[in-house]
Amino acid sequence: MNKTSPVYSESTRCQDCYCCVRECPVKAIQVVDACAVILPERCVSCGTCVEACTSGAKKVRDDRPLAEALLASGRPVAVSLAPSWVAAFPGLRFGQMAAALRHLGFAGASETALGAQEVSARLAQDLDRSQGRYFLSTACPVAVELVCKYLPHLAEHLTPVASPLQAHARMLKEALGPQAAVAFFGPCVGKKLEAAPELDAADVVLSFDDLAAWLQASGVDPAREADAPPLLEAAAEGAWFPVEGGMAETIQRSLRSDHTDFVTLSGLAHVQEGLARLKAPEPTGRNLFLELLACTGGCVGGPFSRTDSAVQARLEVVHGVREVPEACPRSPRLDVARAFRPRPVEEPLVTPGALAGALAKLGKYGPEDELNCRACGYDSCRDLARAILVGRGEPQMCVSHMRLLATRKANALLRSLPFGVVIVGADLEIIDCNHHFARMMGEDALFLLETQRDLSGAHLEKFID
């Protein structure tokens, strides 16, 4: 267990079903003594395993005690509220939510979408000044982790700008003073990565579920609140960010040129596939901006979005955006620069000979033995064998291997018994027997057993009246 990471495992609840291994897009799971443990150095904090785990063994770090400690410290604590809040808490005005948050002890609230507008303004400038380049968006921390850890050769294409949350936190601290703290509420697990002290951004990150539970426990109903003013001005086009394509739409409102193509990759599987197929840019002079979103449909489809319908959530966001002119060029008002560096995950070298040996221990002596049933959580028998060799898997994860071992043990027990034993089905068809039984049945039965190795399929009545 490592509760310092955004996602961790509770070993006592693990049911060794391997659902988390099966669903994890980067296989950041180690199985030890039939318990699935998350490896922080491999994890991208997408939260997929939390949603997949039916036994509740995968947990998201609870940062509410830290938020309460900040409130008790006497420091002013501002709330940065993710723009997808309109889908998580439908029917509320922002002023009502701001008033409710003040009842919890916060100094006030502002929309993270303001930070998104700053990021878009800076990116629009970069795109206007560039030609024939790739740009990978950095608004989604999970996508950034994926690139830095698993596609490090693409890290140089990450846009050197902060995320909307980081930009917004800088705006809030500039407005309230350096002693102020920032708490973020949103639908994302990966945002907890942005609460790192070295980023000087949000001090604590919580989910919409945390917010709903906190409000309920405190007896605060936002629907009954009168509007409270926001800490900063109201956001506009930045509120589109949580919907797939929303970032591209926002950037284009500030562009002054027309030599950039925009593509949105939504869902981590699509992001992985799209980036893996990325080729060198064509010498056309056009830029390509890839909007990378780990959650299908955008942030509104995040693990803590508090809605069962991603489509309805997207509509809530779109309808909640104020009227924005087709072109609303902005100039960045603050420094939103941030550098990213590759942090490649080290993959131990596995030789073909070692792989063949590991497969043999699983009873896989040739391609015909490799079932690739995925019951272990891996896509193929070879992937499991590789995981076993590098210490992330166990032979017991292979169902066919364990069934073979059980059969062998049953057969050994059957043949060691000092008396005749025969196992038959309801139709008296022989399933298995030992040599003592064959001897009792006579020379014909013994001959068949020794030449055919078993009598399975034969009818018992052929040997016994």
Image (cartoon, grey):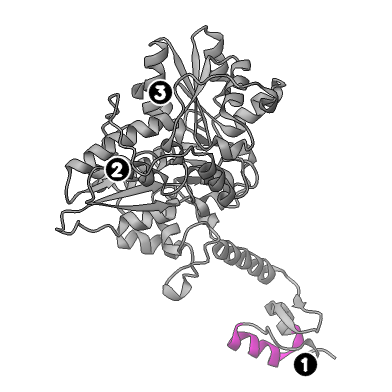
What residue did someone put label 3 on? 169
Name the foreground residue: 208 vs 37: 208
Whether label 1 touches label 2, CB < 8 Å: no
- Note whether residue 264 is visible: yes
Q: Secondary structure at mark 1?
A: helix
Please tell me whether residue 75 belongs to the stretch shown in magenta.
no
* Rendering coords of residue 67 (x, y %): 54, 19
What residue did someone put label 2 on? 344
Dot 1 amino acid type: Lys
Q: Earlier in the sequence, mark 1 or mark 2?
A: 2
Of the residues tagged 2 and 3, which is closer to the observer? Answer: 3
Mark 1 vs mark 2, CA separation in Å: 67 Å
Q: Earlier in the sequence, mark 3 or mark 1?
A: 3
Residue 92 image label = none
What residue did someone put label 1 on? 462
Q: Which residues are magenta?
A: 440-453
Mark 3 vs mark 1, CA separation in Å: 84 Å
* Rendering coords of residue 105 (x, y %): 59, 14
Q: Residue furthest top?
A: 74
- Note whether residue 302 is visible: no
Q: Residue at x 70, y 89 (%)?
A: 445
Q: Is residue 404 left or right of residue 83?
A: right
Dot 2 amino acid type: Pro
